[in-house]
Structure formats: structure tokens, C-alpha cells
Image (cartoon, rainbow, N blue to C red):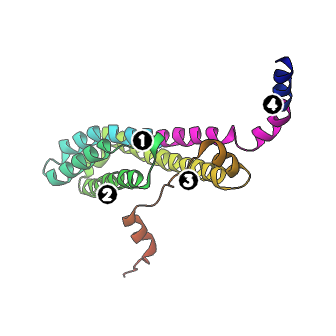
Amino acid sequence: MNLQRLTLFCLTLALAPFLTGCGVQSIPKAKNEVEAQVAEVTNQYKRRADLIPNLVETVKGFAAQEKETLIGVTEARAKATSTKIDPSNLNPQQIMEFQKAQGALSSALSRLMVVVEKYPNLKSDQNFRDLQAQLEGTENRITVARNRYIESIKSFNNLVTVFPTSITNSLFFHFEKMPQWDVAAEEKEKVEKAPEVKF
């Protein structure tokens, strides 16, 4: 019995460098990193959603007649906050629905900012300026969080598909490639279409 334990111990010691270098640790760590990054993306989108009610109320105080735009922002926010991503079970449809809801909210916010241009008193209001600065900062944080998420997905997908760690994945974990964050369809259309210059 002691000989078996000694053999197993020696075999484990001999294989330890091979196992640590072939993804036994790096694949689960990469998956954990992806889950952490998607949580950060959703956290930043939540921060944006939390700022919106205050922004809408401030605008409403100056531009109550812009009811349709204010309702559009409120409805888009409700849709965006009800659309969730499950980091442990990512799939392309889930990501696409989340992106679509967030894109609709971004579009509604853009329309709100166009309305704001009509009201100089609103633009000079300190509360509005503070909220606008916080919203702009949040948009930057969202961009950074999405970029980090994209990189973590790329690293994970490389580990599960590229030799030699792909062998470890097929033997021990059986993880599939995770869907990558993609530009929403309407954004692709904007990117692919050449800008029109009018004078």
C-alpha cells in the first residue's frame, strides 16, 4: 500500500509541471475572468441606468413639453434593466438581446441630448451639468469594461481551442468557445455605410 502511495506521489510530482503548463489551472482561471468581466460590463450599464431617472427629472423640470422623448428614455431604461446576462451560461442570443436593449437606451439618451440643445437654461443648470458629466464618465467606463471583456473572451477562447491547452480542455473540462461581444446590427450598418457629406 505504501508503495502505491509513493508511486502516485512521485507520478504527481513528475506530472505537476506538465499539468500546470497545459491549462489545468489557466482554463478555469480564464473562465472566472470572463465571468468577472461580464459582471463589470453589466455593473457599468447599471450605473448608467441608475443615473437616468435623475437626468429625466431634471430635464422634465425645464422641458415638460418634451413628454414623448422623456417617456422614450424611461421605457428604454426599463427594457435595458430587465434584460440580463447570465455570466455562467453565455450564449450569442443572450448577448445580442442585451446589446439590443442597451443600444435602444443609448439611442433614447441621444435623442434626449438633442432636445436639451433647445433649452439654454437647462444646459446651464448645475444639476444637469453634473448629471451629464457623470453620464459621460459612465459611457467611458462602459467602453473600458467592454474592451476588457472582449480581451478576456479572446484569452479564454484561445485556451480552449489552441494546442496544447485545447487537449487539456477536451480531456478535463469540455468548455465550448464563448460568444464574443459584437457590435449590434444597427451599429454595423452605420459602420459599413460610408458617411454622407452634404454642403
Q: In terms of secondary structure, where does tag 2 sit? A: helix
Q: Is residue 44 left or right of residue 3?
A: left
The CA span between labels 4 and 1 is 36 Å
Q: Earlier in the sequence, mark 4 or mark 3?
A: 4
- Viewer-closest of 34 and 24: 24
**Residue on which the image places disc 2:** 107
Give the main secondary structure, helix, strand or loop, of the magenta stretch: helix
What amino acid is at disc 3? Lys
Q: Is residue 197 left or right of residue 31?
A: left
The CA span between labels 1 and 3 is 16 Å
Q: Is residue 15 left or right of residue 49?
A: right
Quadrant of the snapshot with the N terminus: top right
Residue at x 58%, y 41% (from the top left corner): 31
Q: Earlier in the sequence, mark 2 or mark 1?
A: 1
**Residue on which the image places disc 1:** 86
Q: Position of residue 130 (x, y in %)?
A: 37, 39
Q: Position of residue 175 (x, y in %)?
A: 57, 47
The CA span between labels 2 and 1 is 24 Å
**Residue on which the image places disc 4:** 12
Which dot, 4 or 2, sits closer to the camera?
A: 4
Which dot, 2 or 1, sits closer to the camera?
A: 1
Residue 126 lies in the magenta-colored region: no
Crowding at mark 3 (Cα within 10 Å: few <14, some 14-19, many 20+): some
